[in-house]
Amino acid sequence: MDDIVFIGDWIKDRVLGSGSFGTVVLWKHKNTDERLAIKTCKWGDELTAKHKERWSKEVEMLQNCNNPNIVGTRELPAEFEAGLAPANPSRLPILCMEYCSGGDLRQLLNKPDCSAGLQEPQVRQILSDVCNAMQFLHMHKITHRDLKPENIVLHVDNAPPLPTHTPRKVIYKLIDLGYAKEIDSNSVCASFVGTLQYLAPEILYSKTYSNSVDYWSLGLLAFEIICGTRPFLPFMAPVQWMPFVKKKAHDNICVYETFHGDIEYSNEIFPENHISKAFKVLIEKWLRVALEWEPKLRGRDTPSKVTFNIPAGDKGSPSNVIIFNLLQNILSTKVIKVFSVHTLSKHSYEIDDKTTIAELKLWLSRDTAIPVPEQILLSQATYSYINNDDLAAKYWNDSCNTMLYLYNNSQFFKDHLEPVVPKAVQRCLEHPKALYNFKNSQTLYKNALYFVMSQMEIYDSLIQGLFTRGEALKHESKNLMLQHNVVDKKIGKLVAQEEVVSKMTEIGKKHIQNIKDSGVGTNYLGGFEKIFNDTYDLSEKLTKLQTAWNQLSVRLQSAARRSTEGLSADLNNFIAKYNYHTLLTNAMKVYVTYKKSELYNEHKTKEKQCHDIMKVCYECLKLRSKIISELKNQPFLLKLLDLSTEFAKISEIVTNAADNTEKLSKDLLAVTDEMNNCTWSTLSILASDADNLAELPYSVVSFQKRDFKIGETVSNHCINVANKAGNDDQLRSLIEESLKLRQSHMSLSAKLNSQKQLMTKSTFDFSFLNEK
């Protein structure tokens, strides 16, 4: 195979992997740049019939497995049949597969920055993809039996990345079905296969097992990608650690050695990880199901021991396999992650579509001791202050490690900020001359590198939180300017309206004064006087509002200018002076040097001091302390606090000004309406009669004698009085009685005149006097 470099237009690129039976080689087409991973069996006549059957079965299974998370097969180009004949002495089928350019999961876990596990988005993606693949196999009654990081490859999407520099999408795919076997959930298998460290206990302890062995391997895989190490005594061989694990309780998901070699059982995963606390709690619940010792209970929902088949007469009911559905439910659960700038701590909470920001603030108040009224929540995506009525799910993003930033509006940092130091690192700093054996030194170097990385993550979150606060202030200043402009226009409109009303008032005053000065009767126009006084009061209030508003405009412009003056530049200067990059680089070098020494067994049998990594941890704590001390006195930090307070006050003033403008506008409109009503009512009274004095709204005006006409009632020449004296009822009664008397007098006079006319026209007959 090594001698074959060219086959037609295909060029051998490199060997991707070599197992006990086969070799996988990457071939590249020189014209189309297409890549294929081709697996051939490297043995010939040495193979037994069982081995040949296993090989053929793998090829057949892969060709029949159509799942996005199982490596896909491709049609083998015709030229390879003859071209690879010398490298295929067994004449077994050649397996042609898609090429996954990201390598395998073991290569990813071996990177120094993954020594304490992967980031949560990666963990979620791996578990989702592997769960999908395993569930597909089990639905088709296929047990993989060799699930491990080496058999999971990374398929990197070839599409160009988005303009926002987001990483390319990675799909995790299952490979190597060489040990897979078709068995149903009730059948058993007696063959000894798979990688020993990932084998389920029953494979070593008994001759039979079911597809629940894959649940165990999946649980081990999940724990390792989270913590960077296996959960059960990883420094021991399976025959050594399994007796200890057999004694574990159902809730135990971790068995480890202490510094002094004691065996401890734990219900939690190791604290040195990169996943959120909320997700940690959920995944621990699932690990108890996956890592159940009893194979008949593993992956199932029953709390008591039951068998797969229960006779129909029994009262019990068979348990159900929940391992895949439970994991999918956990992965679909929304966990919102908040970084508290005030306490330099990370917080996470399980939310649903109904969880409000108000509820989230209550949880944060409990965990950070920041009172809810003093909390400020910001989103890096929007740079806007978040309202209590908003839904928390609105700000959830499963690809982000920090979704919201929490601040205290009165103080940036709490007084005492103690770091969270792993126990191994703390012991190293407290006992600098201590000797470490191979197992303890591995733990120390891994935890020390995690400590430096975690402090750098906190520092990056802090800087991003400060930047977000600065951008939010810029955003707030823009919003305040917009609000200011809206209110400013309303005030301008109000001023224009007030000028019109004031002009009307001025003209009205002159006319009324002229009426009074003319000497024609006595005029009492008290209604107008009240309107004129109200208008004057409104004018005074508007003048005060204008004065205060002009002062606020200057204040807002000053604050807006300060919010854009060099905040980013100040932050960048600080980052250039204080950062963890150099320290992290040194920590990586020390860790890599240590890992290389492992390969040469330099200190596996003897104890040694660990001054190099201890020095890195000390420098990390020293840098952390200096950064916090320097930040507290930075001018740009004080500027952020000052601007935050200033904008809060300005926002309150703008809101009050808007309310006052609205109220003055309504009052001015009411005065205008009242003036119009008063004017037109007066004109209406002058143009028509008023039948009843009670209906007259303004003043009674006396006219000279020449203005009266004989035969008309006095009321026709009266003007209603707005402000009547206290004897109105008596006056009304007298006038009404006078009118009645006049009407009676006129009625009697009419009757007398009628009788007079009758007497004049009548002819009297006196003939009755002559009759006898």
Image: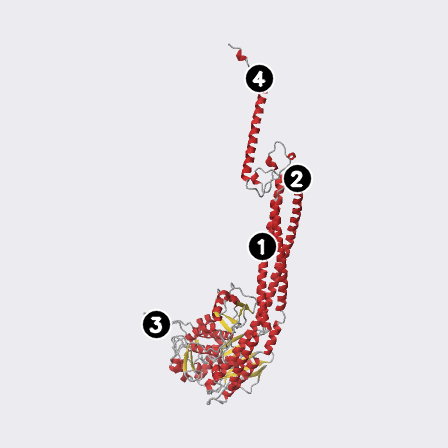
Q: Identify the residue at the far top of this view.
A: 772
Q: Position of residue 714 (x, y in %)?
A: 60, 35
- In this view, 351 is above or below 505: below
Front one among 321 and 499: 499
Mark positioned earlier in the residue sequence (2 or 3): 3
Nearer the camera: disc 2 or disc 1: 2
Q: Amino acid at mark 1?
A: Lys
Q: Are marks 3 and 1 in contact (CB under 8 Å)?
A: no
Left or right, 129 with respect to 486, comes to left
* SS of the residue under disc 2: loop
Q: CA distance from mark 3 to mark 1?
A: 79 Å
Q: Amino acid at mark 4?
A: Thr
Q: Secondary structure at mark 3?
A: loop
Q: Nearer the viewer, mark 4 or mark 3?
A: 4
Q: Which residue is mark 4?
A: 763
Q: Could you classify mark 2 by the number of other residues whose Cα lies within 10 Å: few (under 14), some (14-19), or many (20 or more)?
A: few
Query: By what rule are the colours in the image chosen?
Result: secondary structure
